[in-house]
Amino acid sequence: MFEGEELVATWDEERNWTTTAFQKLMNETVDSCVVLSKQTMEIRFQNGLQLRLHDNSTQYESLQIYPDFIVI
């Protein structure tokens, strides 16, 4: 998770979130979504935060984003 260009939190299956900064994402409005590569997308929020999602697995996974609501 980035705040501007600063990395403020990361998540992995072993440690979960590294800080509580992810809580700033709660109830925030999504401004845009950008595909950065075949394995990475970024969700940009109106408060300036960016959540980068990186798929490092070989399994099929899916994600749906609806206009009025976000369902992951």
Image: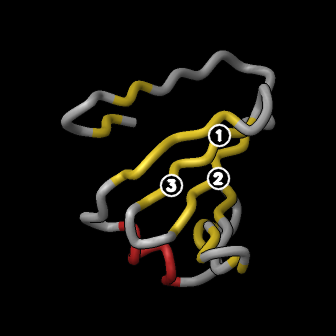
- From the image, tell me which residue sits under label 2: 52
- Estimate the x, y position of residue 17 in percent, counting from the top left: 59, 71
- Estimate the x, y position of residue 42 in percent, counting from the top left: 61, 47
- Estimate the x, y position of residue 64 in percent, counting from the top left: 40, 25
Answer yes or no: do the residues labelled 2 and 1 have beta carbons within 8 Å? yes
Helix, strand or loop at label 2? It is strand
Q: Is residue 72 left or right of residue 54?
A: left
Q: Which residue is painted at 49% across and 83% down in the image?
A: 20
- The kind of residue tagged 3 is Arg
- From the image, tell me which residue sits under label 1: 41
Nearer to the camera, 52 or 18: 52
Disc 2/disc 1 C-alpha distance (Å)? 6 Å
**N-terminal of the two: label 2 or label 1?**
1
Q: Which residue is painted at 40% across and 72% down in the image?
A: 47
Answer yes or no: do the residues labelled 2 and 3 have beta carbons within 8 Å? no
Q: Is residue 42 above or below residue 69?
A: below
Helix, strand or loop at label 1? It is strand
Disc 2/disc 3 C-alpha distance (Å)? 9 Å
- From the image, tell me which residue sits under label 3: 44
Q: Nearer the viewer, mark 2 or mark 3?
A: 3
- The kind of residue tagged 1 is Met
Name the quadrant of the C terminus.
Answer: top left
Query: Which class describes the residues within 10 Å of circle 1: few (<14), some (14-19), or many (20+)?
Result: some
Helix, strand or loop at label 3? It is strand
